[in-house]
Image (spheres, rainbow, N blue to C red):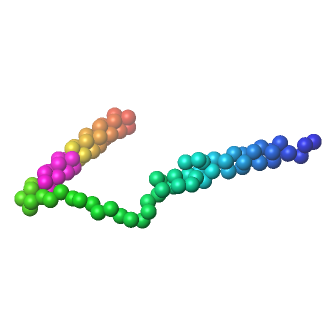
Amino acid sequence: MSGGAGHVADMNNRMKQNRSMKTSNKPKFRSNNRDLNFSSGKSEKLNFKKVSEEELTRIKAEIRKKAQSERKKERIIFALIFLILITILTIFFK
């Protein structure tokens, strides 16, 4: 009897493969290539567009109108699904 030596050997092979797959062993993470993947801690100044107050209120109103229409669509869909479900349940339980 081998005493499970095949299972132990398989476990050792899997552990070796997992160690070789770690990101620190891959070439793209060696040496100075880390600078491409990680920030240096400095934050860049963001430049936002300047918008007048009138334009800003128009944009907000437009966003609110779109949100309201989306909510209305969701309510209609929910109501239709509810009605279909009720009709199906009444048909099967008669």
Task: Tell me residue 58's x, y (percent).
Answer: 9, 55
Q: Residue at x 44, y 63 (%)?
A: 40
Dominant SS of magenta comes to helix
Task: Tell me residue 10's x, y (percent).
Answer: 77, 43
Residue extending farthest left: 54
Asked whether, in this view, residue 78 is left or right of residue 13, the answer is: left
Q: Could you say which is closer to the camera, residue 24 or residue 89?
A: 24
The answer to whether one can see residue 43 in this image is yes
Q: Is residue 14 above or below residue 41?
A: above
Q: Is residue 71 magenta?
A: yes
Q: Could you say which is closer to the camera, residue 18 or residue 71?
A: 18
Asked whether, in this view, residue 15 is left or right of residue 51, the answer is: right
Q: Is residue 72 above or below residue 53?
A: above
Q: Residue at x 85, y 45 (%)?
A: 4
Residue extending farthest front: 32
- Range of residues picked out in magenta: 59-72
Q: Could you say which is closer to the camera, residue 44 or residue 61?
A: 44
Task: Tell me residue 42's x, y (percent).
Answer: 38, 65
Q: Is residue 51 magenta?
A: no
The quadrant holding residue 81 is: top left
Quadrant in the picture for the N terminus = top right
Q: Residue at x 27, y 44 (%)?
A: 78
